[in-house]
Image (spheres, coloured by chain):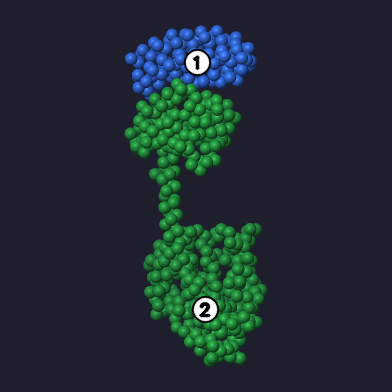
Chain colours: A green, B blue
Amino acid sequence: MIRSPAEQYSQAATADSAVSNGIRDAKILIADDDPLSRRLLVGILQKQNFRNLKVAEGGRAALELLYSFRPDLVLLDMQMPDIDGLEICRHARTHPDSVDIPILVQTATVNRREMGNLFAAGASDFLSKPINPSELVARVIVHLERRELLQELREYRERTSHELDAARRMQLELLPSPETQQALASSAGLRLASFSRSSSEIGGDLWGLLPIDESRFGVFVADFTGHGVTAALNTFRLHALIHEYRSLHDDPARLLAVLNERLTHLLPRGQFATFLYTVIDHVAGVLRIASAGSPPPIISAGMDGGARLFETAGVPLGIAPGVQYEQQVHAFGPGSRLLLFSDGLPEFPSLSGDRIGEPGLVKAVDAVQPDLAPGDVIDGLCRVTGITHAAVLPDDTTIVCIDRRDGPLVDSCKQCVLSGDHSSIQPECHVTESEKSTCLTG
Amino acid sequence: MFDRLEDISLLDDDQIDLLREALEPDELAAMLSELPTTANQALEAIETAVGSAEFEEARRAAHILKGAASSFGAARLAEVARKIELELPSIADIGRIMPLLVETIAKTTAALPIEARKQA
């Protein structure tokens, strides 16, 4: 339960027994150049069972004790001959150890400008003079309780941050490693690159590669509603489900239908995922695609073909049971390029607030040099949309770019791919000079 | 200089009652018995400052006296100290008020032991 400061104040003043022992053990520094005033403050606090008190006879001693005693709270006289209270406040607020300790300044002033200076210098609160013992005790307790709550909150945040960091690493492990991506792509005679970044520590996007056999593999991109922990937990669920239905990896429409049935029962109302799945048959040069409300992929067919959106339809996964999905087929011949992405890419707001949208993305892909490597294509798209390295993403964003820059797969080439034997290059092999060396070295 | 100083009671009974509730009786008695010493030290510092025409030094000593006197319920003494610290424009003016300060300290001192004995 969160209590208002006024409630805390009143409770502190009245419900003495509720004050924790931790508060009574708090270290309190009393800085005042008048011995009698120091003794008065000590006497009042000791009567209230505060046991851990230290006194400073002036500003310099107060500064020293600030760092050696490391108090949890400071009671500070405004006017001391060597260093005044304002100066001590300013000093404390620049030091990491004392930047957030409560500093209660004793002052007889009612001048509004002086009060303003006092708070501007970093005082947390003030104690009016003459000292009112009840007010002193109540304010001390309120500030110590607030400090204790802040410390608990900080510890909670640190713990949560560590846990989120662990969750983020686990989520990263769900994604294909760069080595897996390159191994699968090169064995299929393709080039592949990806980009995946969450809007917070963990996110609701997931993508993956599903090897099927020597001629085919699947690629999926999923995007759950929302961001953060809930969405991320759903990506773990989906990842497990996808791998549970290994026998359906070669059947995009049926895979989506089964995933939809399972997720409809698993997900609470209001949570769902868009999902795009394509099986790439690199031997036949064909894509088989099914979509569940996902942004349409962008396909450039052949070296000379323009880029276009491959319109797909389908209900997102997890909304309603019994949904059937449609498989569509598209050629993926030599020179083709496939771009899969979550809506974080077209919907990313640039500095001027504009979004490139799907038509803008098609234009950008269309303008790309045919032989540009997929990683460079993704970098270029990020530049065009405004996604920089330092940009904070409002939505989780995934991009997967796959292209086919080999010639038609002649028999010898297929042998190359299947056997890993790249000892000779045939005249029919449509490879660039730079790719020849890769071919020859495997 | 003080049109209505006599209207301010020598001791602030409400403040002393608050201290009584907040402190051990012996502790309060001991502190009250120290107030005259603190007041006389301040008086001495102000006299020295007046003698050497150190205006700021006089104000600073008056500030300490004001704080201690007000916190321990010595209301009239606190008011004289406040006047010295915040209102009197020159060291000469402070010099002229010294007899009143001496008299107020004496009256407060005479009154305080009675207050202190109330604790016993």
- Residue A142, compared with residue A412, is above or below; it is above
Q: Is B116 above or below relative to A93?
A: above
Name which residue lies at 40% across and 64% down: A267
Q: Secondary structure at mark 1?
A: helix
Q: Nearer the viewer, residue A104 or A312?
A: A104
Residue type at mark 2?
A: Ala
Q: How many marks?
A: 2
Q: Amino acid at mark 1?
A: Gln
Residue drawn where x is 52% and y is 31% of the image: A60
- Mark on residue A185? 2
Residue A288 showing in the rendered view? no
Residue at 53% across, 86% down: A422
Location of residue A220 in the rendering, given as x and y in whole percent from the top left corner: 48, 73
> Residue beneath label 1, please?
B41
- Residue in the foreground of this view, choosing between B6 and B93: B93
Q: Chain of mark 1?
A: B
Give the distance between the C-alpha atoms of the residues marked 2 and 1, in whole angstroms.
90 Å
